[in-house]
Image: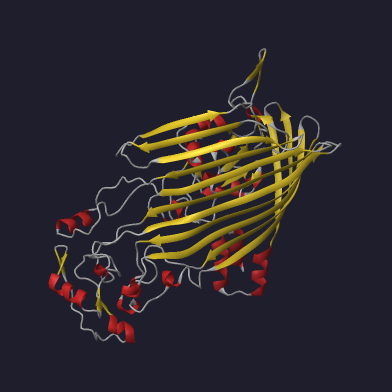
Amino acid sequence: MTTTKRKTLLLSLLLPLSVAAPQQSLAQSGDEMIEEIVTTGTRARERSVSDSMVPIDVISAEDFSNQGATDLSNLLRTVVPSYNVNAQPISDAATIVRPANLRGLAPDHTLVLVNGKRRHRAAVIYWLGNGVSDGAQGPDISAIPAIALKQVEVLRDGASAQYGSDAIAGVMNFILKDSSDGASIEAKYGEFQEGDGGAFSVMGNLGLPLGSNGFANLSFEYGESDPTDRSVQRDDAAAIIAAGNTAVANPAQVWGSPEIEDEIKLWGNFGIDLENNVQLYAHANYVSKTVTGGFYFRNPNNRSAVFGPSGDLNGSQLLIGDMLDAADGVLDGTAGCPVVTITDDVPDPTALATVFSDPNCFSFQEIFPGGFTPQFGGDLVDYSVVAGVRGETSGGWYWDASVSYGLNEVDFFISNTVNASLGPNTPTTFDPGLYEQEEFNVNLDASHALGDNANIGVGVEYRDESFKIGIGQLESYQIGPLADQGFSAASNGFPGFGDIAAGSWSRGNFAVYADIELQLTDGWMVDDDERQDLDQLPCERQLRSARQPEQRLPCTHAGPVECVQRIDRV
């Protein structure tokens, strides 16, 4: 195993501002010590960590600023037990939005909150990446800049009874800074000892007053990261080079972190106090970046259905296309193309020269004599806005009403590849289409303390979710004229989304809950939570309209497990 160290330079400029004490420190008054206060894991008023019924980690802003990394997922991995995220080389769309696992469970088994409000999910559905993440669809934590955070509360225990089924692994509550004055700027640069992976970021935070009783706290981050490579030359590529093919790249296949370009993160947190214990609040964000990674090497002698016949893994001969047969659709060998055999990794030079000189015969060695490695990535855009009002009645009821909207879109691209069935007319760069996740929430929560030892809470929420698959360019999914001769169709490595796959699907969910907490003794507390989903609107309409099996596909693409189960029972 190769050990690689990263050297990081941090530059921080703190302008005059009011600085809060680190969250992990304890304020002292005489011999009395006051612990940090958390809001996660309870619908009662804030309580100290030691009074919480479940383990809660409180991560302060200082814990992030003292690290050299900039990606929030990596920063959390360092300080939160049981939280894991890593680089995803050659992992399809998981390279763009990396899967993060808490307590070894899938990304969508952890509820992610920002200021106590549900964070929308990313558009990527993982099919590669850590195994346990396959089929999951979780929020993109890396979209949050660390400089915007006041603290993070991580509940590392099952909380599905209180928060719903997406809190099986726990809850992560990201609390944004709410200072109305001061500013800070940080700059970081680092690279690995191997000389690759150079990364830089510039980030800042600014607190402004909003009227006489409010605040506007603004944060930004801009950065880029070069790719890394920890691969050695593949044995098959080395053998081809040794046989005299100088067109093979070295290394032919890269294994490492992807390239990240133009990563922009803009966040704002707002609040204003009104009369009668009422507060207006909101937070919003805009994030964009371009991520580019790689796929596996396509061997120029034996890549099935591109360079070699399907199933010929030994590379005994090249796959030659008859362009006259492709034109008339009759497979009778009209062009009389020669058989090009391969001996000791070298195609028959005479037969191959005949193919190259005959416009009616074709081999992909004419376009990629050294094989090719597709470059895959996506342009990510993420934005959201949350707004609400909360307060307390004269009777002691604390209430909170909010509305939120979030969208995450990944527009894929792939280059340095082919649609083999199109032969010499294939592009080498494709737009395969996009994924888009859109969520809209409206909720109302209320709680009331019944003395010192009991609290009740009730709430109602409506959530509308939609998932979209955007159609790709025609060549990315087209079945070309050489398909009948054994050449593969669609963009090699990541087929584009065609008419069959593209579309938009949505569901609506209306739910209510009731919760009661009882402090029986100093060492015993009981929390009982009842919730009920009252309607899965689009799924019910789908069941009433038709029963054809193909109508189950849109629901499963959007990821609603409950919807799939309902249809299976019909």
- In the rendered view, would you say 317 is above or below 30? below
Q: Position of residue 79 (x, y in %)?
A: 50, 33
- In the rendered view, would you say 258 is above or below 372? above
Asked if residue 169 shows in the view, the reply is yes
- In the rendered view, would you say 526 is above or below 470? above
Q: Foreground: 225 or 28?
A: 225
**Could you tell me which residue is drawn at 63 percent across and 75 percent down?**
546
Coloring basis for residues: secondary structure
Quarter of the image for residue 195 reads top left
Q: Foreground: 280 or 548?
A: 280
In this image, 303 relative to 264: left or right? left
Q: Position of residue 170 (x, y in %)?
A: 58, 42
Asked if residue 512 shows in the view, the reply is no
Q: Foreground: 500 or 277?
A: 277
- In the rendered view, would you say 502 is above or below 531? below
Question: Which residue occupies the extreme right position in the image?
Answer: 394
**Could you tell me which residue is drawn at 39 percent across and 67 percent down?**
491
In this image, 127 relative to 266: left or right? left
Q: Position of residue 408 (x, y in %)?
A: 56, 54
**Could you tell me which residue is drawn at 56 percent across and 52 percent down?**
382
Q: Position of residue 226 (x, y in %)?
A: 39, 45
Quarter of the image for residue 182 reads top right
The number of numbered discs placed on residues in the rendered structure image is 0
**Could you tell me which residue is drawn at 53 percent across and 64 percent down?**
469
Question: Which residue occupies the extreme top position in the image?
Answer: 30
In this image, 481 relative to 154: left or right? left
